[in-house]
Image (tube, rainbow, N blue to C red):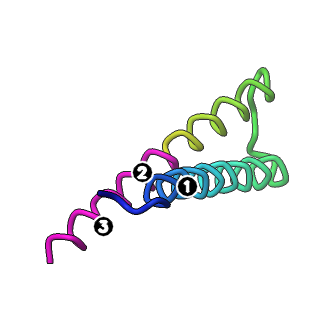
Amino acid sequence: MAPQGARSGYTDLALCGALLGALLVLALNVWDILSGRFDASDPFVHVMGETIGSAAAGAILSVCLGLVHRLFLHRM
C-alpha cells in the first residue's frame, strides 16, 4: 500500500518540471528579442508554441526521473 502523499509527489514533480521548462524557454526568447536575433512572422505563436512544448517536455521528464528514482530507491 502506497503512502497517502505518494501520488501528489508526482504532481509536484510535474508542476516543477513544467515551470522550469517554461521559464527556461521564456528566458531564451527574451534573450533573443533583446539581442535582435528574434525573427518570427508571428511572435505570439512562436513563443507560446515553444513555451507549451517545453512545459510539457519538462513535466514528462521530471515525472520520468521521479519514477526512475523511486524504482532504484526501493530496489536497494
Which mark is first along the chain, 3 or 1? Answer: 1
Q: Residues within 10 Å of mark 2 (few under 14, many from 20)?
A: some
Disc 1 to disc 2, how far (Cα)?
Answer: 7 Å
Dot in front, 1 or 3? 3
Query: Seen from this angle, which residue lies furthest right?
Result: 34
SS at circle 3: helix
At label 1, which amino acid type do we have?
Gly
At label 2, which amino acid type do we have?
Leu
| Vertical placement of residue 15 versus 53, above or below | below
Q: Residue 10, percent across and down?
A: 47, 54
Q: Main secondary structure of the magenta part?
A: helix
Q: Which mark is residue 61?
A: 2
> Can you say which quadrant of the picture contains the N terminus?
bottom left
The segment highlighted magenta reads 58-76
SS at circle 2: helix
At label 3, which amino acid type do we have?
His
Q: Is residue 73 magenta?
A: yes
Judge by depth and name the residue closer to the eye, 27 or 3. Answer: 3
Dot in front, 3 or 2? 3
Toward which corner of the image does residue 70 lie, by quadrant? bottom left
Q: Is residue 61 magenta?
A: yes
Q: Which residue is labeled 3 in the image?
A: 69
Q: Residue 76, percent across and down?
A: 14, 78
Q: Which residue is labeled 1 in the image?
A: 17
Count of labels in the image: 3
Which mark is first along the chain, 2 or 1? Answer: 1
Q: Decide: marks 1, 2 in contact (CB < 8 A)?
A: yes
Please report the residue visible at 57 percent of the width from the left and 35 percent of the height from the top: 53
Q: Residue 42, percent across and down?
A: 79, 22
